[in-house]
């Protein structure tokens, strides 16, 4: 079965640079979620989109922004990167109005040097 | 206090053992409950949803007690491949965020 696709899988950036992470949800899933997992921590919710509209917002820094496009893929844009932004970034998708279950992509490992 | 609390473990058990994980949540309005499994540096994978009536999937049994705000996962006949971190996860409502516990590490040894 098709899964959530994330790209790139690994990304190395320097402080103050920008990064763009992409997420392609499971086909027919209309809701996308972004989570950040720091070393030794549990995943923390950043933001979600349903039908291209922001549906919920968590602890996402103002330096980050995200959107969902007409084909339901989503991008997380991160600017003025800081060392503390180094983490695994997971995208998850679900089929709203059908189930609350979320399925996660393999993640993007971001390292800020 | 975290919204979802779990015993961090680690639980070190021999193959074939039965092991139980417990979890409590603080938001009584929470609507959906899950157990996810996470292997080192990999994505969380949905193990099972947890229903009020309790549910079973092969060697795995999950229970929910809404009155006590308590969730459990029982693994019978542990396999080496069960070694992972088990995350108790709660949806506080709607088609929105999941709230994760810190996870319980399980190590199954021969």
Image: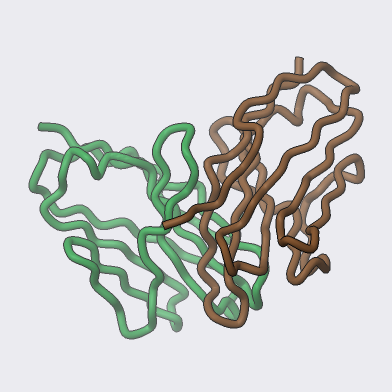
Chain colours: A brown, B green
Q: Position of residue A76 (x, y in %)?
A: 78, 45
Residue at 8% x, 47% y is: B16
Q: Position of residue B101 (x, y in %)?
A: 51, 53
Most foreground residue, B87 or A87: A87
Q: Position of residue B95 (x, y in %)?
A: 65, 73
- Considering only vertical position in the picture, is A6 above or below B93? above
Most foreground residue, A56 or A98: A98
Q: Position of residue A38 (x, y in %)?
A: 63, 35
Most foreground residue, B97 or B30: B97
Residue at 65% x, 37% y is: A7
Residue at 55% x, 79% y is: B31
- Could you tell whether B92 is left or right of A66 in the image? left
Quadrant of the image for the C terminus of chain B? top left
Most foreground residue, B70 or A10: A10
Quadrant of the image for the N terminus of chain B? bottom right
- Considering only vertical position in the picture, is B22 above or below A50? above
The mark total stands at 0
Residue A30 in which image quadrant: bottom right
- Could you tell whether A30 is left or right of A4 in the image? right
Residue at 78% x, 20% y is: A13
Residue A20 in which image quadrant: top right
Residue A51 in which image quadrant: bottom right
- Considering only vertical position in the picture, is B53 above or below A100? below
């Amino acid at each position: 079965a098709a899964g959530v696709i994330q790209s790139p899988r690994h990304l190395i950036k320097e402080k103050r640079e920008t990064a763009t992470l992409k997420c392609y949800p499971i086909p027919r899933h209309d809701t996308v979620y972004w989570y950040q997992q720091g070393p030794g921590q549990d995943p923390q919710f950043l933001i979600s989109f349903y039908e291209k509209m922001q549906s919920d917002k968590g602890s996402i820094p103002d330096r980050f922004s995200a959107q969902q496009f007409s084909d339901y893929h989503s991008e997380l844009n991160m600017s003025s990167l800081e060392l503390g932004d180094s983490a695994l970034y997971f995208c998850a998708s679900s089929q709203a109005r059908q189930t609350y279950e979320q399925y996660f992509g393999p993640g993007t490992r971001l390292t800020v040097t | 206090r975290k919204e979802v609390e779990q015993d961090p473990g680690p639980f070190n058990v021999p193959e074939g053992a039965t092991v139980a994980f417990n979890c409590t949540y603080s938001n009584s309005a929470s609507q959906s409950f899950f157990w996810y499994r996470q292997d080192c540096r990999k994505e969380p994978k949905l193990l099972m949803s947890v229903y009020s009536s309790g549910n079973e999937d092969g060697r795995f049994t999950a229970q929910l007690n809404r009155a006590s705000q308590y969730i459990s996962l029982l693994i019978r006949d542990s396999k080496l491949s069960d070694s992972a971190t088990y995350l108790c996860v709660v949806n506080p409502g709607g088609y929105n965020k999941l709230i994760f516990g810190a996870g319980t590490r399980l190590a199954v040894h021969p």
